[in-house]
Image: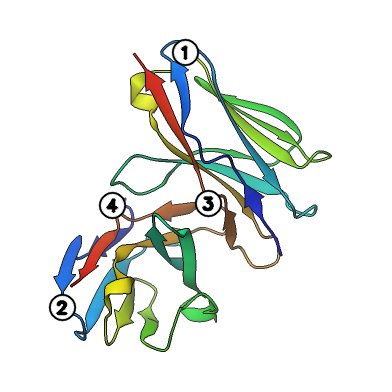
Amino acid sequence: DAGVIQSPRHEVTEMGQEVTLRCKPISGHDYLFWYRQTMMRGLELLIYFNNNVPIDDSGMPEDRFSAKMPNASFSTLKIQPSEPRDSAVYFCASSDRNTQYFGPGTRLTVL
Amino acid sequence: QKEVEQNSGPLSVPEGAIASLNCTYSDRVSQSFFWYRQYSGKSPELIMSIYSNGDKEDGRFTAQLNKASQYVSLLIRDSQPSDSATYLCAEKSESNYQLIWGAGTKLIIKP
């Protein structure tokens, strides 16, 4: 198995632009998690899905953030409009109900 | 509110010695605990999981769980410079499959 796949690996954008991060979970996993990691705040859970349905989005910082999972093999995290304080590493992880496996992450820089 | 606490370090250990990493948690009903290793610029990767009181060994790594005292520890024997990383402790919420994360302990193995 290729593991969790994320794209892009790096994204540099300007304030106000829309950013879309993509994730392909491990086949057969029914949970998908989106995290954000910064030096100041550590690893924060933004939202997670079970069987493509959003279960808890209480970690999504603002309405500028949205996430979708249209099918079992694809999810997106969108930020519109982006702000410099959104600069962080965004991880997607998938789980088989027990262990979470992380993708390589997307390093987002908003100028 | 459920919390997982770790000393942020850095913890400096000479090569070949035993590195001891500790974690305490607040949720008495938690049953599953995980240690992840994160190299700088990389994603967290699972190194150990533990569900029962006592010790669990895997190569140079030993996880220890004490539910009565609500702590989990990770011992690394014969520590190597390649063990230098941040170690994240996490407990799994039994109600919703989320992981509650500690802030991580930075471990430095000195040659």
Mark 4 or 2: the one toward you: 2
Callout 1 and callout 3 share a chain: no
Q: How far apart are labels 1 and 3 at the CA level?
A: 27 Å
Secondary structure beneath label 2:
loop
Q: Relative to A79, is A7 on the left or the right?
A: left
Q: Mark 2 points at which residue?
A: A14
Question: Which quarter of the figure is the N terminus of chain B placed in?
Answer: bottom right
User: Mark 1 touching mark 4, by CB under 8 A?
Assistant: no
At x 40%, y 47%, the residue is B44
Callout 3 and callout 4 share a chain: yes
Q: How far apart are labels 2 and 1 at the CA level?
A: 47 Å
Q: Mark 1 points at which residue?
A: B78
Mark 2 or 3: the one toward you: 2
At x 15%, y 74%, the residue is A13
Query: At which x and y percent is residue B70?
Result: 76, 42
**Quadrant location of residue B100?**
bottom right
Q: Relative to B102, is A2 on the left or the right?
A: left
Callout 2 and callout 3 share a chain: yes
Q: Name the residue under label 4.
A: A2
Secondary structure beneath label 3:
loop
The answer to whether B6 is drawn above or below residue B61 in the figure is below
